[in-house]
Structures are given as C-alpha cells and as structure tokens.
Image (cartoon, helix red, strand yellow):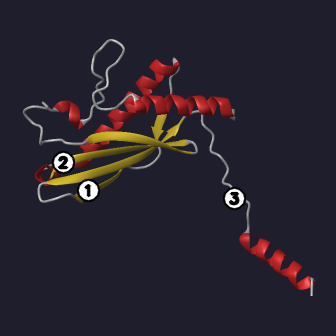
Amino acid sequence: MPIDNKKKYEIFRGLAQAAADGYDGAYDSDGKSIKIGLRREKRDPVLERERVLMDGFNISFHGDLVCVKYHSEILLKELHQSNRFESEVEQSIADIVQFLQKRYKEITGKGIRMSPFDEVDIQAESMNRIRSWIRAKRHFKVTGLKKEPEIFEEFDPETKIRNITKKFLSLR
C-alpha cells in the first residue's frame, strides 16, 4: 500500500521532534525529567561526574529506514572488564527506540512501529589511557513507509556512453 508524501512528511517530522525532545536535561509537560534509559541518567552528577561525560543519540532517515545512532564515553576498564558490553549497548539502542515510539505517540497521537533491519554496529575508539568513545548505530524499518526507487536504478552507463559515442562518430 503506497503512502503519500504528506503522510511520509508527518512521520519524519514526528520522529525528528521525538528525537529532539531527548536532549540531556529535558522535562516533560508535568515538569518531570525525561528518562530514556541512557547511561547519563544512572549517575549522580556531583558524586560521579567523571564516570560519564557525554552520552546521547541522534536519528537520520534513509528512505524507509531510520538509523538510530548512539554515542557515549566509557572508562577503558569498563570496556575490557564487561563481558556483556555489547548487550548493554544494544539495550541502550532498544531503550532509545522505545522512547522515540512513546514520544511520537504523545506528539502525533498515532503509534508507530519500528522493527530492526540489521545488526548493531558498535565501534570503540580510545580517547586516552582512561576513557574511550563508543559509537553504535542500528537501522530500523518504519512500518508504513515505502522504499523510494533509486535515482540511477534504471540507468545503464555503458549503453548511454555507447549511444553518445555513436552519435559523435556519425557527425564526421
């Protein structure tokens, strides 16, 4: 069932607004801080200020897919000692998706379903001898969105070049 551009625009706008409402220190309409399930929410900012300095997420759209990107800082010893590190990152992305779905419903009044499209891609980079950066991303298929055709899907470059060459040679 094809979806019109107005509906697609509403879905994109609603998801983008839901992601924008997930900044650090955000409050809902009742004045309570918004909980997403990220590492920054599990710390006391006064006592454990060096534990997590940066933690957040972003989304981008790729046709009928939504790419959820997660970024965090972690202590190097936590990275090496935790044998369930990957599952923790996957759970963080799952919590982000759950937050996006809940917030989308609050904004638009309609529900949205996002199903995993691929595996979680996790990259860890050393910042210094104490901390590391973690970047993870996962694509989700949004139910109701149709994949757009590729621009050059029907373009055969060899045929085009041959035709141009034949035309040029016929001019002599």
The residue where tag 2 is placed is 74
- Looking at the image, is mark 2 or mark 3 earlier in the sequence? 2
Instruction: Answer with the quarter of the image where residue 80 lies.
Output: bottom left
User: Which numbered mark, 2 or 3, is in the foreground of this view?
Assistant: 2
Residue at the image point whose x is 22% and y is 47% from the top: 73
Q: Earlier in the sequence, mark 3 or mark 1?
A: 1
**Any part of residue 113 in sight:** no
Instruction: Indicate whether 134 appears above or below 111.
Output: below
Q: Label 1 belongs to which residue?
A: 124
The disc label shown at residue 57, or none: none
Mark 3 → mark 1, Cα distance in angstroms: 35 Å
Query: Disc 2, disc 1: CB below 8 Å?
Result: yes
How far from the left and from the top, in percent, is residue 149?
Answer: 67, 50
106 shown above or below 66:
above
Query: Which secondary structure lies at badge 2?
Result: strand
Q: Which of the 4 image quadrants contains residue 1?
A: top right
Q: First in sequence: mark 2 or mark 1?
A: 2
Neighbour tally class for label 3: few under 14, some 14-19, many 20 plus, Cα within 10 Å = few
Q: Which amino acid, mark 3? A: Glu
Residue 81 % position (x, y): 11, 52
18 vs 138, nearest the viewer: 18
Amino acid residing under circle 1: Ala
Mark 2 and mark 1: Cα distance apart in space: 9 Å
- Image-based side of 16 in relation to 78, left or right: right
**How far apart, in angstroms, are the residues tagged by discs 2 and 3?**
42 Å
Q: Which residue is mark 3?
A: 153
